[in-house]
Amino acid sequence: MIIDSHCHAWSYWPYLPPPAHPEQHGSIETLIHQMDQNGVDKATIVCAQIYRNKTNNDYISNAIKSYPNRLEQFADVDSFWSETYHIKGAAKRLEKSIEKWPMKAFTHYLAKSDDGKWMNSKEGIDFFKVAEETKIIASLAVAPHHQNEIRKVAERHPNLKILCHHMSGLKSYGTDKDINLINVLESGNLPNILLKLSGFHYVSKEKDSWNFPYHEIKYIYEKCYEAFGRNMCWGSDFPVVKPHMTYKQSIEAFRTYCDFVNEEDKNYILGKTLNKLLQEARK
């Protein structure tokens, strides 16, 4: 079984420059077609209620009715672009989201400039407590410097599963790249923190983001595999990945070219690990 741990779908393409057909470019139907063409059994859709898509949670919820065995919803709750970002009442808003949508997880994007301390404030503690008690997975868009606060959350809520998007924002460049890598690797000691093995185009320098199969950044994925092992989940980042590589290349960048991963662990990273999380999550 192959499960895409990180993809999106929108009723209207939210980014510039606009594509030729913005209504189809990132649609559910386009995603399902790519999944069918590449042997992907299921996808967990990371909702993002951004430009022209303020009702993206509803769009994905409705899509699940059409594809109940192929899709899971990771509903957008209080991400940094929302008016409710880190204001009072986050736990109640999460409860209402759980009641409204057929979600297995919530998605929460932290601002890169944010120090992450909100996660361990009274409001943040209540927020993650609701997720833990209702068996909702936390799918977090975070930077490496947020890992210090994430580890505190993971230790306080040992039954909460935390999925960090795109290698937790690691980069192969910058003066702080080595410190950031060490910080992320430390989180591999906590069994309820997992990394999405995705975002090769983000880890690369911008000028090399098309350079499949990304040999120059493979060492980052190898180090993370050594630290996290099977606690990693492959993701495509479709359709945002389109300018950088195809859906098939997003799979093969891992399956074929991450040759340091043994075959059994590849099966876990491609789907078995996430399938177990979904089975254990809220029904």
Image: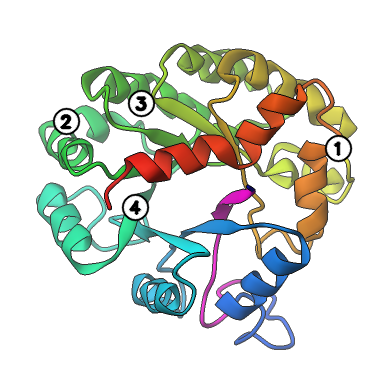
Q: Secondary structure at mark 3?
A: helix
Q: Residue at x 28, y 45 (%)?
A: 136
* Mark positioned earlier in the residue sequence (1 or 3): 3
Magenta stretch, main secondary structure, is loop
Name the residue that disc number 1 marks.
Answer: 256
| Residue sitting nearer the eye, 183 or 112 | 183
Magenta span of residues: 2-16
For label 3, the crowd category at 10 Å Cα-Cα, with few meaning under 14, some 14 to 19 and many 20 or more, is many
Please name whichever residue, 217 or 205, is drawn nearer the observer in this view of the structure.
217
Residue 232: which quarter of the image? top right
Residue 72 position within the rendered picture, expressed as x and y whole percent measured from the top left: 44, 60
Q: Earlier in the sequence, mark 3 or mark 4?
A: 4
Disc 3, disc 4: CB below 8 Å? no
Residue picked out by circle 3 = 150
Residue 197 at x, y percent in the picture = 63, 36
CA–CA distance in space, label 1 to label 3? 31 Å
**Residue drawn at point x = 56 percent, y = 37 percent:** 272
